[in-house]
Amino acid sequence: MVNIWNQVEIVLKQRQLNINQLAKLMGLKSNAVLYEFKHGKIKRPSFELMERIADALDVSMDSFRQNNTGDEDA
């Protein structure tokens, strides 16, 4: 199973962004929900959250489903 947050972090690193910058791009007042997601307190993120992350990072939601080898697991 692919850890979705790990996929988000890959994109963040590629874009040279941090979690605070992502929260700002998403229009969030706080980065708390992203920290909860990062630290496993949100096991199954909502479609809306994933859509907002994808939009902020300008990627498709499918990019979060791929593992590091490029194979789709989910």
Image (cartoon, rainbow, N blue to C red):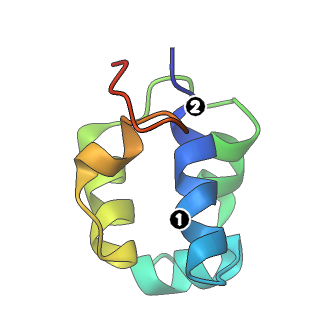
Q: Nearer the viewer, residue 70 or 29?
A: 70
Secondary structure of the residue carrying tag 2 is loop
Q: Residue furthest right?
A: 39
Query: Badge 1 is on which residue?
Result: 11
| Three-letter amino acid code at the position of disc 1 | Val
Q: Which sits earlier in the primary sequence, circle 2 or circle 1?
A: 1
Position of 44 with respect to 47 (left or right) is right
Q: Residue furthest front?
A: 69
Which residue is at a point 60% across and 58% down the rendered structure image? Answer: 10
Q: Quadrant of residue 44?
A: top left
Would residue 30 be seen by someone viewing this image from the given angle?
Answer: no
Return the x and y of residue 71 as percentages of the image width and height. 37, 28
Return the x and y of residue 43 as percentages of the image width and height. 55, 23
Q: Is residue 50 above or below residue 21?
A: above
Secondary structure of the residue carrying tag 1 is helix
Return the x and y of residue 30 as percentages of the image width and height. 62, 72
Return the x and y of residue 29 as percentages of the image width and height. 54, 79
Instruction: State how far apart marks 2 and 1 are (Cα).
Output: 19 Å
Would residue 37 be seen by someone viewing this image from the given angle?
Answer: yes
Q: Is residue 45 above or below residue 58?
A: above
Query: Badge 2 is on which residue?
Result: 42
Front of the two marks 2 and 1: 1
How many numbered marks appear?
A: 2
In the rendered view of the protein, which quadrant contains the C terminus?
Answer: top left
| Three-letter amino acid code at the position of disc 2 | Ile
Which residue is at a point 25% across and 44% down the rendered structure image? Answer: 62
Which numbered marker is on residue 51? none
Which residue is at a point 53% across and 85% down the rendered structure image? Answer: 24
Position of 6 with respect to 1 (left or right) is right
